[in-house]
Amino acid sequence: MEVRSMHFKARVAEKLNDPVLQGNLRLSKGKFVDKRAESIRELPEFEATRDAAEAIRNRALRDLDLWLEEFERKATARGGSVLWARDGDEVCRLVIDIARRHGVRKITKSKSMLSEEAGLNQALEAAGIQPVETDLGEYILQINDNEPPSHIIAPVVHKSKEEVADLFARVHRKPRKTDINEMTREAREILRPHFLSAEMGLSGGNFLIAETGSVAVVTNEGNGRMVTSLPKVHVVITGVEKVIPTLEDLCTLMRLLPRSATGQSITNYISVLTGRKRPEELDGVEHMYFILVDNGRVGLLGSEFQDMLRCIRCGACMNHCPVYQTIGGHAYGWVYPGPMGSVLTPLYTGLDQALDLPHAATLCNQCGVVCPVKIPLPDLLRKLREKQVEEGMRPWFERVALRMWAWVATQPWLYALGTKFAVRYLRWLAGGSDRIRVLAAAPSWTEGRDFPAPEGRTFRELYSERQRR
Amino acid sequence: MRVGLFVTCLVDLIRPRIGFAALRLLEAAGCQVIVPAAQTCCGQPGYNSGDRSATRALALKLIDEFADCEYVVLPSGSCAGMIREHYADVFRDDAANGQRAAALAAKTYELTDFLVNVAKLDRVPGRFEGSVTYHDSCSGLRELGVKGQPRALLSKVPGLRLTELNGAEECCGFGGAFSVKFGDISARIAERKCGNIQASGADAIVGGDLGCLLNIEGKLRRMGDDRTRVLHVSEVLAGND
């Protein structure tokens, strides 16, 4: 997907002034946050399970190469083909090659954020192959002129039911419906023939299990099962970091993933798919391919950002992020929004592609405390800020201001003098009132708020006076 | 107990009375309070902006200034969190100073945490007629576990009624430099916080970090609310000088 993160500030302004979006964000915030809180109350060992999950993910990442080889061996033994892709372009090329080899003209897709990274749908269309998104949210986005998702598990969370009703009426050319069951049925009627006629199904993978060579696919809508069992060919696209050693590890992680994501104790479907159809079996796919993707992940191994690879894509960090809750996902400008996106976007697409994102956080650590695999997101955001400074990417006035401030703050006499004048100036600006309405030094503060007036003398002055008395 | 008081740069500049209130509370708890005259800033703005060398210089200065105190107390969860949780990282490549930073971190406390858990203050000097609600600032809450301490102390203030704030643990949108770099997002987050504060019906919103309080007060006033008082917890606990 094209990276638009450099337009973050402009898009923020747009999103803050979109009353429909603001209403939708308010609604979804309550749902995600409250439901998660409720669902973890029924699991007293939630915190201990987080520790276990962190350890599982760390163990997998410590010897990632070995687990991937183990996965490849097991998956191959069950008739799967394991292919490796360095980047998005290679993903597209591999998928198109497989499609051509099997005479595929239509591909049904279950949710895959990696296919968004790769811009796969556009590449397929250009190659004359029709991709059909079958996750309801992704379907809605696809028929809305390939709108990008705004959330990793609820891609269409930025839209209201009314907006979807309008879209359905326009695209489906049927009478407008606003009952959710009826709207879903309408989408299902359109998708059903696609499920039956597609020659190939494409899915993401929540986890790869090394000991069995399986992929685990976690869904709520059942479309994942149709995509991975009806066509002759199933292609799994997933990041190399998604491998875990054992099925038991999967069980531990599954106690956290749905609770953290949607507040469900378990999702409607958890499919563990192992190999293609065997001679004695009646159904199943005839060809199974795994495309395991780097696209920036391998570079994080052994770096100060390795912790980020633990991510299991639950979305809890964005659901709890005050910034995400205020601007939604599109402003972030690439595939992944919220705190995890603000870490991943610069790491995967280039620090200079997303200068604002690491700074677009209050470092409140609400994300860190809800992360099921305990990724220290604020620390990683701060490290990205350090990298920007080290590489001279910050604007000159910010660098100069920081340097000046730090130097003055190490010279107590100068600091005392400077602050003495500063507080008197601010006091004067307040003009006898308790607030400053326009602060020229920080106009972006006073655009939306007043700045409370200082008392007018520094603590330092008052304290030394008191000592002298 | 020889206690060093670090008033923080924001208090020094904007609300000296919070520094004096902290001083009174520490004295009421029987501490011998030292206020190093040359203190400036803990270095957090530099740290959160990614400028490690600026942070280092200020951290070293602070470590020197408070080296001979038994405890260091700050009327701010955010600055106390900087010292306790992040100084170690500032000196991650410098073992000698890293040890000194760790020694400082071990004796550094947020004010209400210190009053409850170390000084065990049982009577507070302040009085307050009316209802207050409490905003849990992020660093104090999530880095230092400051949650029950301010409430325990506020419950000792004669005349004060504490009502819980809806979404008390949610960020107010301040975030230091964030509040200026992304003033529009910051103010919008503050609006949500202020809505909850008004819905609580309390006479005052109380918190433990001046940064958050400036953000909240600024937004309340801009929203036309001149009624809700915005107070640092130390002001309420210490009462008037």
Image: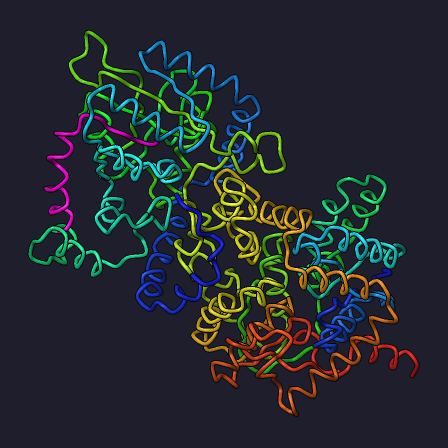
Q: Residue B189: horizontal and vertical position, in percent?
A: 48, 66
The magenta span reads A183-204
Residue that sits furthest to the left in the current view: A175
Q: Position of residue B2 (x, y in %)?
A: 87, 61
Apparent side of residue A455 relative to residue A81 in the rendered image (left or right): right
Residue at 74 percent across and 75 percent down: it is B13
Viewer-side residue, A379 vs A38: A379
Counting from the top left corner in percent of width and height, residue B93 is at: 77, 39
The kind of secondary structure the magenta stretch mainly shows is helix
Q: Is residue A5 above or below residue A103?
A: below
Res B125 quadrant in image = bottom right
Please indicate, yes or no, whether residue A116 appears anywhere in the rendered image. yes
Q: How is the image coloured?
A: rainbow
Tell me: residue B37, above or below residue A256: below
What is the x, y in percent for residue B176?
A: 62, 63
Specify whether residue A196 is painted magenta.
Answer: yes
Q: Quadrant of the N terminus of chain A?
A: top left
Which residue is located at x 29 percent, y 27 percent? A96
- Residue drawn at (63%, 52%) of the image: A393
A101 or A44, nearer to the observer: A101
| Whether residue B34 is visible | no
Residue in the picture at 50% in, 77% down = B202
